[in-house]
Image (cartoon, helix red, strand yellow):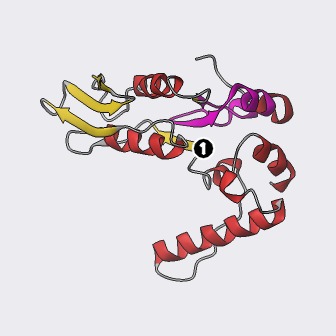
Amino acid sequence: MTDNLGILRKAGFFKDYEALSDVELMDTLRKKRKEEYSKMFGYDYEPQDFSHLTTLLSQDDRKFLDIDLEADVLNGNNVYVSVLEDFAKASNGHFSPTNIEEVWDSDEGPIKVSFSSNGQQIIFEPEYLDDWIDGRIFEVINEEMKKVCNESFIVCLVPNDEWFGQNIIHVRLTEDEKQLLKEKLNWNFPEQ
């Protein structure tokens, strides 16, 4: 897993650990992950090592998001509020929604999601899709990102489309970072 860590870091991953070498970074991430799992389980727990790239990259929640589209989108669960907050955290400060509200007229909609961003009130009316997220929310987020920076959240499929399914991987990238990942690691990015 450490073979490509230098390329991933050049593509903007793990910026919070710039002062560490690749070996020190991996040791730090392992220790952090062990502490998180031990706290969750209430006893000393050693999780598996970073055997999958998603496991490693999920340690950088300021750049990498693994979104389960079947997210129990139900009246009262505020899934769209959580999605907006997760993307805000991963945006490096470029997407900062405030006054987020998710209002349902009934258990099957219509649904109204509103928030303030870049000095404007944004209103999104997602389609009711049982308990699935309406993927148009990601377009709304990227439109707000484009107003303030040259980065966007890009759907990513690593080689062989192994990140394809019910979950969708979003990575915050510049065009240069995207090209680097395509050329050096053969990552795939579906046209958006």
Closest to the observer: 133 or 90?
90
The residue beneath circle 1 is 63
Closest to the observer: 38 or 147?
147
Above or below, 70 against 119 in this view is below
Q: Element type at marker 1?
A: loop
The segment highlighted magenta reads 154-180
Name the residue: 45% across, 45% down. Answer: 86
Residue type at mark 1: give it. Answer: Lys
Name the residue: 37% across, 37% down. Answer: 97
Above or below, 72 against 149 in this view is below
Inspect this view and state whether residue 72 appears: no
Inspect this view and state whether residue 106 appears: yes
Q: Is residue 41 shown left or right of residue 80?
A: right
Q: Is residue 165 magenta?
A: yes
Q: Quadrant of the C terminus?
A: top right
> Quadrant of the rendered structure where residue 130 is?
top left
Name the residue: 71% across, 64% down. Answer: 49
Closest to the observer: 119 or 189?
119
In percent of width and height, residue 186 lies at 81, 31
